[in-house]
Image (tube, rainbow, N blue to C red):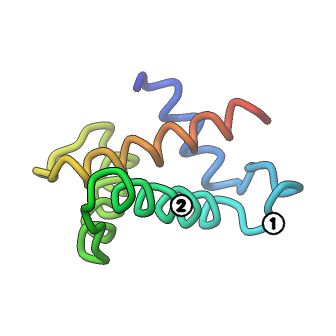
Amino acid sequence: MDKETLNKIMESLSKGDFNKSDDPRGTLSILINETVAYRDKLKEEYGKVLTVVDTRIALDALQAYLVSGNLTVELTPEQNELVKIWLNKLTDTNEAN
């Protein structure tokens, strides 16, 4: 992700600029919905369980990424994929506004 996209995400997070007409819970709703969808996909397609610990580690990595612009922590493939899903969805949502 380039610096301009990261800056747009950070600006939107601070302003709460996400399209709230679709879902008034904003960013938190995006994170929850995408996590549940990914959890269900992992279970259905691969028989893997996404744990609360996995989700917490991914959330910490997302937070660090939004601050620093890079992933500095070792993640499992599932944790890494969840971070990518969140970033893609947040970027898509931001660009739609």
Q: Position of residue 32 (x, y in %)?
A: 55, 66
Q: Amino acid at mark 2?
A: Leu
Question: Which of the labelled discs sits on residue 24, or is there none?
Answer: 1
- Give neighbour class at mark 1: few <14, some 14-19, many 20+ (Cα, 10 Å): few
The foreground one among 70 and 19 is: 19
Q: Quadrant of the C terminus?
A: top right
Q: Residue at x 52, y 35 (%)?
A: 7
Q: Amino acid at mark 1?
A: Pro
* Secondary element at image label 1: loop
Task: Say whether marks 2 and 1 touch (CB < 8 Å).
Answer: no
Q: For the residues marked 2 and 1, what is the alpha-carbon distance in whole angstroms?
A: 13 Å
The x and y percentages for residue 82 are: 36, 51
- The residue that appears at 36% across and 53% down in the rendered structure is 62
- Residue 83 appears at what percent x and percent y? 36, 49
Q: Residue at x 25, y 67 (%)?
A: 54
Q: Residues within 10 Å of mark 2 (few under 14, many from 20)?
A: some
Instruction: Specify the label residue 31 is tagged with.
Output: 2
Residue 91 picture quarter: top right
Q: Which image quarter: residue 85?
A: top left
What residue is at 62 percent from the left and 55 percent from the top? 14
Report whether 87 appears left or right of 82.
Answer: right
Residue nearer the viewer, 54 or 7: 54
